[in-house]
Amino acid sequence: MPTPRRAAPPRPRPRTRRGGAPAAVAAALLLVLAGAGAAPAAAAPAPATATAVRADLDPVTVRRLDAAIGAVMEKTGIPGVNIGLWIPGRGQYVKAFGVADTRNRTPLKTDMYSRIGSVTKTFTVTAVLQLVDRGKVGLDDPVSKYVDGVPGGEHVTVRQLAAMRSGLYNYTEDPRFLDALRADPHRAFTPRQVLGYAFAHPPNSAPGTKWQYSNTNTVLLGLLVEKVSGQPLAGYLREHVLDPLKLSATSLPAGSALPEPHAHGYTDFAPGGAVVDATDWNPSWGWAAGAMISGLEDLRTWVPALVGGALLKPATQAERLRMGPTGVPDLGYGLGIADFNGWTGHNGDLPGYETIAAGLPGNKATLVILINSDTDRGGSLSSQVAHAVTRIVTPDHVWSAPAPVPDTQSSP
C-alpha cells in the first residue's frame, strides 16, 4: 500500500503509475498508490518450481494448474505465489511457487506472512456489523452520530460507507497525499491525517447515488468501531473477530514490521519505475482500509466465516451479502465484500503485495492467493493468477481477466 502510483481500485478509472500519468485500470478491488523508493532490488522472474506442496486434486488438474500458474509467473515476472484452493469433495491444492527474497533466492513457503491490503476491509466491516448486532450501531444512522468532522456527515449513512456509496473523496487519489507518501514511504500516518486529505475535496457525488470505491469510507468505519466499542481497532478485532476464529497469524499492526517468516514484497511504485523492496514500508496510511497482515491458512479459515456469516446474525449477514451494481461487468459490491462472477470475498493491492481471499458459495470452494509483488505487467497480478486458476477448476465462474495497463505512462 505505501506509495502513490495508482489512484484506483475496483473499477476502470485513472490511476497513477510510476508516479506519473493516469492510465485506465482494470476492475479489481485494490488499495493502491504509487511511490518512491526503498533500496533497489533485482527482481528477476522467479522459477515456477513449487515448494511446500499439498495437492490431492486429480493429477490432470494439478498438472494444468501448475502449468497455468507457471505461465503467468513467466509472463509477468512475479517473484512468488502462495496459493490455496480447497474444494470439498474434490480435494485441495496448496502450493508455494518462486521466491520470498529476490536477493537471496530464498524459496517462498506456504507458512509465510504477507500484507493483505484491502482484504482488511472485510475484517473492519465485520466489526461494524457486530456492533449492529449488539444494538450499538444502526446501518442507516448518519456517520455524524459516531464520528465528528465529516463534511455532510449528517447525510452519509453507515450503510453507504460500507457499500462504497458515500460519495466521499478517496484520499489515496489526493496529489498532496501521494507526494507525501512518495517522499517518505516509512512515514506513520494517523487516521485523522489521511481523512484530512479526503475532506479537503468536495464529495464526488451525493450520498447513495453512485458506487465509488473509496478508502476514506473504511477509515471512517474504523473510527466508528473505536468510538462505539471504546477499544483501539486492533484490540477490538483481536478480541471479537480474530480470537473467536483462532486466527493467530492475522493482525492489524501498529508499525511496519512483519512477523517472521515473511515474504519480501516488491513494487515499481518508485521514480522511473525501478523495482524496489517495499517490505518495511509503513502501511499506517491504509489502517482500517488496508494495513492488516495474515497468511494462507488463516485466510482459509476466514473466507468461509466471512461468506457464511459465522460471527453475525443471519439477518445482518443477509444485509452484508446484498450485492449492489458497480458499473463493472461481473462485479457486485455488498457491505465490505464483493462478488466476482460468483466468487465472494475481496482482493487487496498495496506496494509489494497482492491478495485474493474469496469463496464460491455454491460448492463451498475457497481460494486464497498471496503474491509478493504488485508490478502489474498486463494488469493486476493476482487477478491474472485467479483467472488462470478458475478457468480450470470453476469454468462456470471464471475470475475476470484484468485489462492490460498501457505502457504509455510517463516517469516522475
Image (cartoon, grey):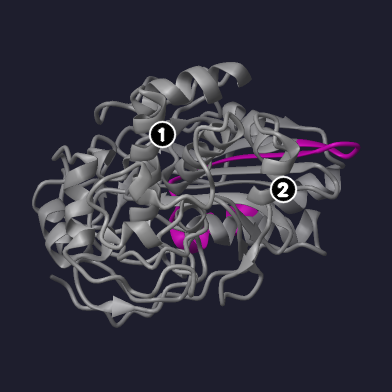
In the displayed structure, 56 sits above or below 206; it is above
Q: Quadrant location of residue 134?
A: top right
Q: The residue under label 2 is which amino acid type?
A: Ala
For the image, the number of numbered tags is: 2
- The residue shown at (25%, 58%) is 269
The answer to whether residue 344 is left or right of residue 117 is right
> Looking at the image, is 362 positioned above or below residue 14?
above
**Disc with the residue nearer the chain's start (1 vs 2):** 1
Magenta segment: does it hold 59?
A: no
Side of 302 where 225 appears, left or right: left
Q: Are marks 1 and 2 in contact (CB under 8 Å)?
A: no
Residue lying farthest to the bottom in this orientation: 408
Towards the viewer: 151 or 384: 151
Query: Residue at label 2?
Result: 318
Would residue 290 be visible to someone looking at this image? no
Circle 1 packing at 10 Å, graded few (<14), some (14-19), many (20+), is many
**Which span of residues is magenta-colored?**
69-92
Percent coordinates x, y for residue 140 in the rendering? 52, 52
Percent position of residue 324, x then y: 62, 66
Does 84 lie within the magenta span? Answer: yes
Tell which residue pokes out farthest to the right in this image: 89
Count neighbours of disc 2 (C-alpha within 10 A) and say few if under 14, some if 14 to 19, many if 20 or more.
some
> Which image quadrant for residue 153?
bottom left
Residue under pointer 1: 225
Q: Tag 1's secondary structure?
A: helix
How far, Cα to Cα, is label 1 from label 2? Answer: 21 Å
Query: Is 240 on the left-hand or right-hand side of 373?
Result: right
Q: Nearer the viewer, residue 381 or 64?
A: 381
**Is label 2 in a helix, a strand or a loop?**
helix
Q: How far from the left and from the top, in percent, is residue 356?
A: 56, 48
Q: Quadrant of residue 316?
A: top right
**Amino acid found under the numbered disc labelled 1:** Val
